[in-house]
Amino acid sequence: MIRGKCMKKKIINIVAVLLIVCGISLIGATIYMKYTAHKRQAELRASFESMVDSNTDKDTKSADKSSTPKDSSAQKDPEVSKVKPIAILIIPKIDINVAVGEGTGNDLLRYAVGHFENTALPGEKGNLCLAGHRNFTYAEYFKDLDKLQKNDEIIVKTKDKEFTYLVTKSFIVNPDEVDVLSPTKDETITLVTCTVGAKQRLIVKGALKK
């Protein structure tokens, strides 16, 4: 009887230790992923800024060797080196200031906002479509996207110019309702993220401020 109780107590202690270890491992993994996302986002921003600097140098007749881009691919994360930064997305109301990369693959969305390929570029006629996570584990840039209201500003800064869009509406769709990405006649923007639980998609639409 006593032996049975000791064995039961020993099993409980082992389970408790395993749960603690699992908890610590989960916290550690989350911290590592957040750190990696932050580091990669910083590198993508640096890559964009070097493009802006290079663009400025083209208009300067006496550019010296010190104007070499700061983020050489040898120093960058290999994953970031594959990504083309196209803009900086700024949404003042919800404190977003993030580099936008070309593509919407899972790896990219872990540390940046992604541009849907074959949709309009910033300032162009058509539908500029961007996707972002609101997942705490990774880069939660769009976590407060649901707080945007009509006429709130969405600013997209490219290497050449800055464009301001005004929110027109927001709504929820199912994942298969991809018509929200369809081209438009005017200069518009579409922001896409998951709803809580990731079962549906939150869509925010905007139009270029004239």
Image (cartoon, grey):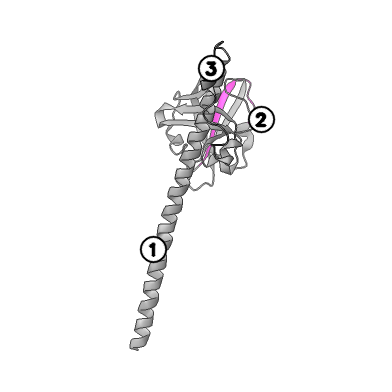
Start and end of the magenta stretch? 182-194
Which is nearer the eye, 97 or 67? 67
Q: CA distance from mark 3 to mark 2?
A: 37 Å
Task: Look at the numbered discs 1 and 3 and tell me whether their residues touch, using CB distance below 8 Å.
Answer: no
Numbered disc 3: secondary structure: loop
Q: Is residue 196 at all visible to an observer of this figure? A: no
Was residue 4 drawn as part of the magenta stretch in this picture? Answer: no
Q: Quadrant of residue 123?
A: top right
What residue sits right under mark 1 in the picture? Answer: 20
Q: Residue at x 41, y 63 (%)?
A: 21
Q: Is residue 7 at all visible to an observer of this figure? A: yes
Closer mark to the observer between disc 1 and disc 2: 1
What predominant SS class does the magenta segment belong to?
strand
Badge 2: few (under 14), some or many (20 or more) residues near its Cα, within 10 Å? few
What residue sits right under mark 3 in the picture? Answer: 64
Q: Position of residue 113 (x, y in %)?
A: 53, 35
Q: Position of residue 16 (x, y in %)?
A: 38, 68
Q: Is residue 165 above or below residue 134?
A: above
Q: Residue at x 53, y 17 (%)?
A: 64
What residue sits right under mark 2 in the picture? Answer: 118
